[in-house]
Amino acid sequence: MKLNSLILAGLLPLVSVGAYAKVNDLLQEVKISAASQEADIKNNQIIFHGPVEVTQGSIKILASELRAFSKEKNSGKILIATGNPATYSQVMEDGRPASASAKEIRYELSSRTLTLIGDATLEQEGSQVTGSQIRYNIEQQQLIAESTGKDRVITIIQPENYQEQIQPEQKPEKKPEQEKQ
């Protein structure tokens, strides 16, 4: 039971992306830069051909193609970024970066669900979860990672002092001659 608690405690900072994401990001304009785009107005769909770059505040999505559409009129908006891989990154409220990558990144706005499909990785501060598919409900802060066939879900949790280990405090070294003077 203690091991489960330890693993859960290590995973919480990794999967709490929505809780600590910059609130200001969602108030910023969305800018989509692409090589070309086409709109299917009848079916409520826009396709951006890449390379595609989407930015909104500190949020950045890079993809080969981006589809934006609604399941039904005025509800269920969905963004699907595809690439080899498509990537998502965002700076959290505390300044720490979080990132994700997969062959397909699907974001359903109405349910606030991010689904990573195909070689999926979710990473924050060196800790990561990988699998065939990762589904994360931002609002409920629930994560489900799955793999298929012989593949396994892999979770790597860095020790609490990981950031201190990779960014040691920079102190100028004193030379023996300077110490004697």
Image (spheres, helix red, strand yellow):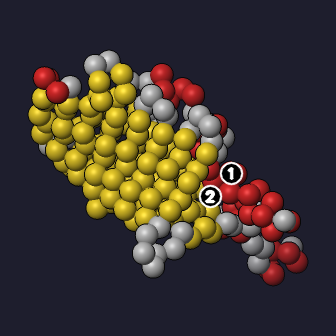
- Residue 124 placement: quadrant: bottom right
Residue 6 appearing in the image: no
Label 2 residue SS: loop
Which amino acid type is shown beneath numbered disc 2?
Glu
Q: Quarter holding the N terminus? A: bottom right
Residues at circles 1 and 2 in contact by the CB criterion of under 8 Å: yes
Q: Is residue 78 above or below residue 82?
A: above
C-alpha separation, residue under disc 1 versus residue under disc 2: 9 Å
Nearer to us in this view, 122 or 77: 77
Residue 142 placement (x, y as % from top left): 61, 45
Position above or below: 50 against 154:
above
In the picture of the structure, the residue carrying the numbered disc 2 is: 125
* Residue 156 at x, y percent in the picture: 62, 69
The numbered dot on residue 154 is none
Q: Quadrant of residue 173?
A: bottom right
Mark 1 closeness class: few <14, some 14–19, many ≥20 residues within 10 Å: some
Q: Is residue 23 left or right of residue 111?
A: right
In the rendered image, residue 76, in percent from the top left (x then y), is placed at 37, 27
Question: Which mark is drawn over residue 13?
Answer: 1
User: Residue at point 23% right, 52% down?
Assistant: 64
